[in-house]
Image (cartoon, helix red, strand yellow):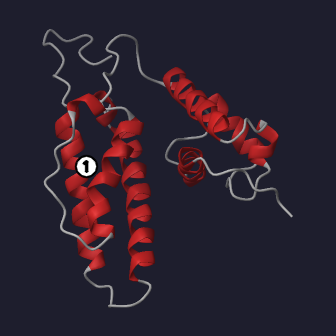
Amino acid sequence: MVGLGSTTPPRDREPIKVTRILGEYAQELFSTEAEAYPADDRLAQWRMALAKRIETDIMIHIRKLGTVYAEGLEYHLRDSEMQKSIWPALSPLIHGEQADEIRPEPSSIEAKPTDGPLGKDSDVARRAKLLAEYKSATGDPSNRKIYTARNSGIHKPEFLRWQRGDLPSTSQTCVNFERFLREKKAPMPRQ
């Protein structure tokens, strides 16, 4: 939809630049807060929890940008690719090392389709793919086993809304559930 009704061509996509900026932003957030942590045996756990929180916060803000600006960051890079750019940037910091300069490999960034409007259909397709990958990696559990699992963080009504694309990507339930799927943890039955 970018560029429709305009005589100027749409801007070029810049996936590598967006990857670098997101990584640097994540590192700044992490460093600012981690400096206040005292030396303690639990420091590694705190850093890991901080990194997860930063990843979640950044993705929530990215999704909110997409609702404010018609173009959004997904014009440049898929949602899943943006999320993948955060962990390599934070990994050295989690382990107390210096962060390297962020230089993503161009081959690791998938080409984004240029035709067709991005919207609910692409989100539904992305979610279906994520669910299929999860099921394949965890022994093909049924949808019921997934939404009744105590570690999935979702219940049936929300799961169905998520599948249809009606559950907003910015909701905490959606963010947590998609992280659960990406981490490919087996569903644990409720007791």
* 50 sits left or right of 24 in the view: right
Res. 173 in view: yes
Seen from this angle, which residue lies furthest right? 191
Residue at 49% across / 23% down in the picture?
A: 122
Quick one: 106 or 127, which is closer to the camera?
106
Residue at 57% across / 32% down in the picture?
A: 127
Q: Which residue is mark 1?
A: 22
Quick one: 2 or 154, which is closer to the camera?
154
Residue at 76% across / 53% down in the picture?
A: 149
Where residue 89 sits in the image (x, y, percent)? 26, 55
Where residue 20 sits in the image (x, y, percent)? 19, 46
Quadrant for the N terminus in the image = top left
Where residue 90 sits in the image (x, y, percent)? 30, 60
In the image, residue 98 above or below residue 59: below
Res. 76 in view: no
In the image, residue 107 above or below residue 139: above
Looking at numbered disc 1 in the image, what kind of residue is underneath it?
A: Leu
Name the image quarter holding residue 142. Answer: top right
Residue at 29% across / 33% down in the picture?
A: 108
Quick one: 14 or 43, which is closer to the camera?
43
Quick one: 70 or 82, which is closer to the camera?
82
**Numbered circles on residues, count:** 1
The secondary element bearing badge 1 is classed as helix
Where residue 150 sits in the image (x, y, percent)? 75, 59
In the image, residue 108 above or below residue 9: below
User: Few, some or many C-alpha atoms within 10 Å of disc 1 (few <14, some 14-19, many ≥20)?
Assistant: many
Quadrant for the C terminus in the image = bottom right
